DNA sequence: GCAAAATTATGCGCGCACGCAACTTTGCGT
DNA sequence: ACGCAAAGTTGCGTGCGCGCATAATTTTGC
């Protein structure tokens, strides 16, 4: 990897880290782009060369590179597995890994509506690679079908995310008291279930 | 209806009309919010009390109230019809009606990337009423399933819209030369087809 | 009718996103 | 080692979205 790309990734990571740290320190709404940029040792203008909005850097510190994982996870399933099982396991697995998130991060995201919207939208990032993974796995399907199914999966994930964040963060009256109300992976699985007939109709229309 | 609501609707309509007219006259990118507001006889600040962004007023002049139509269209299908037929017909019917759009309007939307994104996002507006219509029609389904299915339908519509706008507007080299590349309703139907197994699995799991 | 209450319109200010035009750094061939 | 083209960074200016406080307008209660 060239020096250029290493520097870019270093800057991106520095911005992510600075954004998350500052947001945790003083609350999501009290962080200016200028401050994030300064903490990362970079110009305010440069910040928007890396992230399209103020919230994206904070959320990116948590979601990092989900997109790449999905495609790999779908491709990693044994060839005998049905599309439904492969996709559901892959997507649910995305949200099963706790990662190294600072404990208050998800709570903060659930609290701020702007961050919620941004976090929910990250589910859209899995659609394109998922479509590629589907056409790669099931050669018979056309492009439109693959895109519709992956968009449907993304939409279901968004519904699950939204519901989870809503029930999790909806406790403004008593701060510090948060009930996860069920694990996220289970909620994602439940949200994906109504789509399984559509998924399963692809690769195994006669296998039953 | 009270005087207040009538005035509000009049203002909203005036803003829509002014936005569309100005955008058609001098191009989508050469219209400032201030000008739209002035043409509608209202303060610039008031504009953003009616529309959240500059593009929304323009797009709203075309899409108007799609959301209400979907719920009505789904509910209007005979009770014997399956959920799949009802939803597909209702959504496809939305885009079949040519309406009274000025001829260049859709071309303009297809040309500007910002307007494209905004127009595609309007498909999300049908999700909430569609979810309501689904729980209304099929009493057995839980809320999560209805929301996931309607979100999937909205996602499929977005894919269709995006593809249609892409193939329609992708002719920057030869302006004025536009091939619709197939009717939008047919494309919507095609995009909804992969989801039919999921839709049909709801109300008629034993009817086959 | 009229004054209080509720709702809406407006002005102001701030921060953000981004196009544009310099300027600086990096990669690469000679 | 040198220089040039490509890529990245920065400052500047503009328009936008919106929170907030205030004025104008409609509705309500009497």
Image (spheres, coloured by chain):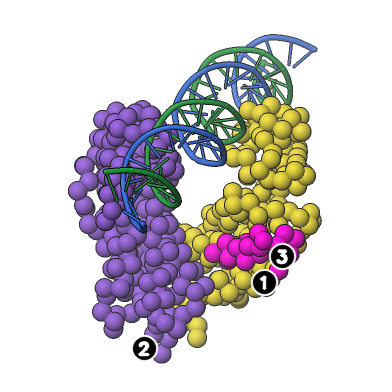
Chain colours: A purple, B yellow, C blue, D green
Q: Are marks 1 and 2 on the same chain?
A: no
**Disc 1 from disc 2: Cα separation:** 38 Å
Label placed on residue B181 = 1
State whether residue A13 is above or below residue A202: above
Pointer 3 residue: B178
Q: Look at the image and give the residue range highlighted in magenta.
A: B159-179
Residue at (79, 54) in percent of width and height: B102
- Indicate the quadrant containing the C terminus of chain A: top left, top right, bottom left or bottom right: bottom left
| Residue A140 seen anywhere in this rendered image of the structure | yes
Counting other residues with Cα less than 10 Å from the Cα at mark 2, is it few (<14), some (14-19), or many (20 or more)?
few
The kind of secondary structure element at disc 1 is loop
Residue at (63, 28) in percent of width and height: B45
**Disc 1 from disc 3: Cα separation:** 9 Å
Of B171 and B11, the residue lying toward us = B171
State whether residue B78 is above or below residue A202: above
State whether residue B196 is above or below residue B178: below
The kind of secondary structure element at disc 3 is loop
């Amino acid at each position: 990897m060239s020096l250029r790309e290493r520097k870019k990734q270093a800057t991106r990571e520095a911005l992510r880290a600075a954004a998350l740290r500052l947001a945790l320190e003083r609350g999501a709404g009290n962080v200016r782009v200028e401050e994030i940029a300064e903490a990362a040792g970079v110009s305010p203008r440069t910040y928007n060369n890396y992230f399209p909005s103020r919230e994206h850097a904070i959320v990116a510190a948590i979601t990092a590179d989900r997109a790449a994982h999905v495609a790999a996870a779908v491709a990693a399933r044994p060839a005998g597995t049905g599309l439904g099982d492969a996709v559901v396991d892959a997507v649910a697995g995305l949200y099963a890994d706790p990662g190294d998130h600072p404990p208050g991060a998800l709570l903060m995201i659930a609290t701020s509506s702007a961050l919620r919207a941004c976090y929910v939208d990250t589910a859209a990032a899995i659609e394109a690679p998922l479509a590629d993974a589907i056409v790669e796995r099931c050669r018979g399907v056309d492009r439109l079908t693959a895109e519709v199914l992956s968009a449907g999966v993304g939409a279901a994930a968004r519904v699950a995310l939204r519901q989870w964040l809503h029930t999790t963060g909806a406790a403004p009256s008593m701060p510090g008291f948060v009930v996860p109300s069920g694990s996220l992976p289970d909620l994602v699985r439940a949200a994906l279930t109504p789509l399984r007939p559509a998924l399963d109709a692809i690769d195994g229309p006669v296998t039953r």
